[in-house]
Image: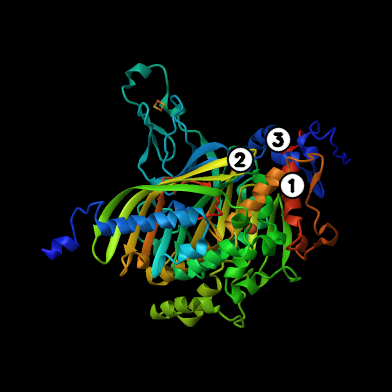
């Protein structure tokens, strides 16, 4: 019976492991809106990936062109870029407010939680509001305590990923 | 005679008078009427880049895009010929194709199902009885643009009377040949396209592709993030060999890394960059010879120049930069990633590495593009002020010299390429 307890076919939102995943997703969203990029990066596992693909269907990010396809090395450089003050787009970046919701647990085990959600982000800069909407998939590795939970993969699939989007000085 | 641009005459001058040898009026970025004129006088009367041949690999392949503001379909027919068709049904005007790329046998209008072949001929009309004695199908083909290619670059024009493409390109052809050598012995194919918008006039981007001057300033963030070898490669600010040539007809070439201008001219002394060690190991494992590996890896950053074609495409080091004017203060840019087309065990690792290099700089979240876009937004905002004050494109005007080939030449940080583009603009926008 432990089998069914640790790996439920249709996981519930009230499952404590799912709640931990949602909490982490919300913590990440808050850090990104506040542009606390160092703390944001610390939420990712060393082998974690942060991806914004162009092709709405692909999972082969290696062989396709993406907007973002960051491993730990690229993420580290991105944090430097966003914080060191050389990047004029980041220095004068839009103010963002994002809502992540419509969470759906896809896979739940004691080791990992996979969630699907939608994200709506409004970016305001110089009299203009840009809307960034899309689906987000989170793969979260559960640690011994909630504070040790880490993002192994986050994939942001924009509704307009194949169209022209504004050039951004913030992260999704 | 040059008319002095003042606050009281700037809105009365004819567009052509707004361009002088070394300066242009800020009104050229902000006046919607000038934009309307540009869309017809320039974008409907010259060769506009629409595709790379690799985007149409098979009979039936198509791509939808724009010539100026007109939506078009670029298609390859059963015999392999490439056509550019206005994306507009001959019945009551519906767009025929809303997919960016794909494969089709033809195009059927969603409204009343008139169907057209890949070369634009009207093939079928449902319930044709109502048209008996009314229309002749052979007169209702899709509007077809003249379409010509050079070196895999496909251009179209709405003007039946302008010179052939190759004549328009002139000395550019030599540089296109050089650009395509970055396949390292293989032909070039499109790997993917970034698209982004910025809140500024299209000419701000036209200038930027030949603006070596902004590079260490705007791209300091990117420079700080790359390895020392790459940063060193892009340190052209004080390199006297790094020059820009005016190639005529508004085209220019900016050689940032002149030692990579002709990738075949390799004397074997340049060290391959450490960052490609893993790629080199993969290529050895694929049994590629050392000399073939060297060819491919030396071309990883593309060729050492930006070849800027008036008015809408730049062949920019390792990618194509395509601009599409939307309105006087909005422009869409495409950054098209390219790489060699060959057997997967060779081009697979090469193109994966090229995709990562491209993502690092380009696109809406790259380490370069957003900073460029911020600079361009700021030009558009600033240019609202003091419309009589010129935009200066005079850098290096006193140190231009003809090259042995006869091209007006100056340092790559100079504004020679912008002056070339504006001279063409002035000619096309003049009333006579
Ligand atoms: S508008 Fe195309 S068939 Fe009627
Ligand atoms: Fe730039």
Q: Secondary structure at mark 2?
A: loop
Q: Secondary structure at mark 1?
A: helix
- In 3D space, how far apart are the residues under numbered discs 1 and 2 (Cα atoms)? 31 Å
- In 3D space, how far apart are the residues under numbered discs 2 and 3 (Cα atoms)? 20 Å
- In 3D space, how far apart are the residues under numbered discs 1 and 3 (Cα atoms)? 16 Å
The disc label shown at residue B31, or none: 3
Residue B359 at what x, y percent from top left? 50, 61
Residue at image coords 84%, 62%:
B399
Q: Secondary structure at mark 3?
A: loop
Residue A163 at what x, y percent from top left? 47, 46
The reply to whether the residue tagged 1 has its Cβ within 8 angstroms of ligand 2 is no
Q: Is residue B271 left or right of residue B2?
A: left
Residue found farthest to the left: A1
- Find disc 1 in the rendering and name its residue: B422
Name the image quarter holding residue B39. Answer: top right
Between disc 2 and disc 3, the foreground one is 2
């Amino acid at each position: 019976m432990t089998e069914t307890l640790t790996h439920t076919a249709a996981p519930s939102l009230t499952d404590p492991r799912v709640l931990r995943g949602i909490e982490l997703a919300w913590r990440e969203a808050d850090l990104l809106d506040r542009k606390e990029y160092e703390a944001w990066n610390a939420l990712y596992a060393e082998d974690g990936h942060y991806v914004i693909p162009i092709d709405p269907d692909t999972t082969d990010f290696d062989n396709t062109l993406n907007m973002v396809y960051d491993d730990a090395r690229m993420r580290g450089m991105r944090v430097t870029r966003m914080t060191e003050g050389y990047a004029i787009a980041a220095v004068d970046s839009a103010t963002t407010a994002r809502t992540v919701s419509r969470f759906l647990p896809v896979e739940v085990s004691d080791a990992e939680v996979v969630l699907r959600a939608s994200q709506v982000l409004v970016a305001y800069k110089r009299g203009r509001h840009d809307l960034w909407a899309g689906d987000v998939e989170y793969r979260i590795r559960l640690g011994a305590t909630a504070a040790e939970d880490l993002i192994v993969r986050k994939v942001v699939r924009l509704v307009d990923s194949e169209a022209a989007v504004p050039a951004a000085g913030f992260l999704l | 005679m040059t008319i002095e641009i003042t606050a009281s005459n700037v809105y009365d001058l004819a567009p052509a008078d707004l361009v002088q040898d070394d300066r242009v009026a800020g009104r050229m970025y902000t006046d919607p009427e000038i934009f309307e004129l540009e869309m017809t006088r320039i974008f409907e009367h010259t060769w506009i880049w629409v595709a790379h041949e690799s985007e149409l690999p098979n009979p039936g392949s198509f791509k939808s895009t724009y010539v100026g503001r007109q939506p078009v379909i670029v298609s390859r027919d059963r015999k392999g010929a490439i056509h550019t068709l206005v994306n507009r049904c001959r019945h009551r005007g519906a767009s025929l194709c809303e997919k960016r790329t794909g494969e089709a046998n033809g195009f059927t209008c969603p409204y009343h199902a008139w169907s057209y072949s890949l070369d634009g001929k009207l093939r079928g009309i449902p319930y044709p009885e109502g048209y008996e004695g009314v229309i002749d199908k052979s007169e209702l083909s899709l509007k077809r643009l003249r379409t010509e290619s050079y070196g895999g670059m496909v251009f179209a024009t709405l003007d039946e009377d302008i010179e052939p493409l190759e004549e328009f390109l002139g000395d550019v052809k030599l540089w296109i040949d050089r650009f395509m050598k970055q396949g390292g012995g293989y032909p070039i194919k499109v790997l993917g396209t970034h698209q982004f918008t910025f809140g500024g006039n299209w000419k701000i981007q036209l200038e930027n592709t030949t603006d070596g001057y902004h590079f260490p300033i705007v791209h300091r963030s990117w420079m700080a993030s790359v390895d020392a070898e790459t940063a060193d490669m892009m340190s052209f600010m004080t390199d006297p060999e790094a020059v820009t040539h005016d190639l005529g007809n508004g085209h220019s070439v900016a050689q940032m890394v002149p030692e990579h201008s002709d990738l075949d001219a390799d004397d074997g002394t340049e060290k391959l960059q450490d960052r490609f060690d893993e790629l080199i190991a993969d290529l050895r494992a694929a049994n590629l010879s050392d000399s073939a590996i060297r060819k491919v890896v030396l071309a990883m950053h593309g060729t050492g120049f930006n070849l800027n074609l008036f008015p809408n495409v730049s062949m920019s080091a390792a990618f194509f930069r395509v601009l599409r004017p939307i309105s006087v203060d909005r422009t869409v840019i495409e950054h098209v990633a390219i790489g060699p087309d060959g057997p997967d065990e060779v081009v697979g690792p090469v193109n994966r590495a090229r995709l990562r290099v491209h993502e690092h700089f380009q696109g809406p979240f790259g380490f370069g593009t957003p900073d460029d876009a911020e600079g361009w937004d700021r030009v558009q905002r600033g240019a609202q002020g003091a419309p009589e004050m010129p935009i200066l494109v005079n850098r290096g005007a006193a140190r231009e010299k003809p090259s042995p080939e006869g091209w007006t030449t100056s340092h790559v940080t100079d504004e020679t390429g912008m002056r070339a583009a504006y001279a063409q603009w002035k000619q096309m926008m003049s009333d006579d």
